[in-house]
Image (cartoon, rainbow, N blue to C red):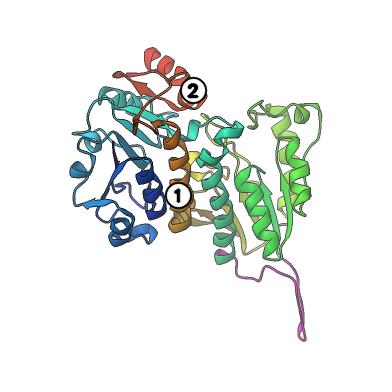
Amino acid sequence: MKIAVPAESAEAESRVAATPETVKRLIALGAEIVVQAGAGEGSRYPDADYQTAGAKVLKTANAVTKDADIVLRVRRPTPAELHGVKAGALAIALMDPYGHEAEIAALGEAGVRAFAMELMPRITRAQVMDVLSSQASLAGYQAVIDAAEAYDRAFPMMMTAAGTVPAAKVFVMGAGVAGLQAIATARRLGASVTATDVRPAAKEQVESLGAKFIAVEDEEFKQAETTAGYAKPMSAEYQAKQAELTASHIAKQDIVITTALIPGRPAPRLVSKAMLDSMKPGSVVVDLAVERGGNVEGAVAGEIVAVGPATIVGRLNVAGRIPATASSLYARNLYAFVETLIDKEAKVVALNYEDDLVKATLLTNDGAVVHPMFAKKEGAA
């Protein structure tokens, strides 16, 4: 059983799908691990560390993936990157399937069995495999660090002989995994933190971290969460009421961090140009949803721009900005999933298609898109 770890080719992607730690654990399952030279350099894992852990290091991606039973990646492989991968091999990565039906269909045509880690079900046994949570938590942390870098004042209140420095006012919009970590990080830096979310359960979580919860708490708000724990799209009426409440609040803030995402949909617009214009000079807005269209009007993916008195930070791949930590967590997520796909006695890949984990994440099989959410769209197209 051969497991391949090629280097990532996407621009600005410095994460890697396996670390020396997980290489040792995969070898213990009976696997031969082959890593492409330089794959871990962006995450501070030199080739020598992989070799010490027991992996083979080869120069080219084709040499690494040839005859592989499992290919581990951070991002969805292109058809060219799957050239030479044998039919039936498992390709496991963040597949970014929403809105990319053609690319997913191409994976099926390549003959691989593609698994999307971001579709991992939110059940107890899958918590250790939850890549969205592990990476979003790091993104929430890094968002505050990016905000502190752009903000030209101190975060904590300081009592000095020359007078008192007030604490920065930080408003976090969206209290999912990323938002909660942003709240905790901003609090640790000494900021005065408020937060909002459309999910009722978020109120208690926000307050448990020492932040104040801001929301229109009407009947629609009480029903604004799916059984899977995600936020539901809100009505235009609710959005208008929430915007009115938050507009007056944003005008008083030094830093705003937006984290709102809805799976399969463009990011909801939370901060308008008028709201930005109402902010104080030197204010900072960090848009963690900029890759999905953005929560902030005027945000530009991959850039830091000035809009009125505010600076909008639109970094891409925010978790990947701390790649050593991000790779460590992501690789552990992958290992936990791969372990469930292997017959430990025979030391071979043994898929159980009735397993909830497989059913939730398997995108392609036998040359076709098989996931119900995307197979229908492919047929309609």
Would you say residue 307 is visible in this rendering? no
Q: Which tag, 2 or 1, sits closer to the chain's start?
A: 1
Front: mark 2 or 1: 2
Q: Which residues are magenta?
A: 150-167
Tag 1, which secondary structure?
loop
**Residue occupying the point 81% across, 31% down:** 218
Question: How crowded is the residue under tag 1: few (<14 C-alpha within 10 Å), some, or many (20+)?
Answer: some
Q: Is residue 165 magenta?
A: yes
* Count of labels in the image: 2
Specify the quadrant of the image occupied by residue 192.
bottom right
Q: Which residue carries the number 1 mark?
A: 317
Q: Looking at the image, which is closer to me, 156 or 113? A: 113
Relative horizontal placement of residue 69, taking residue 289 as reference (left or right): left
- Residue 301 shows in this picture: yes
In the rendered structure, does residue 52 fall within the stretch colored magenta? Answer: no
Q: Residue furthest bottom?
A: 161
Q: Main secondary structure of the magenta part?
A: loop
- The alpha-carbon separation of the residues under discs 2 and 1 comes to 31 Å
Q: Residue at x 67, y 44 (%)?
A: 175
What residue did someone put label 2 on?
A: 355
Disc 2 crowd rating (10 Å Cα; few below 14, some 14-19, many 20+) is few
> What x and y, as percent, mark residue 263?
54, 31
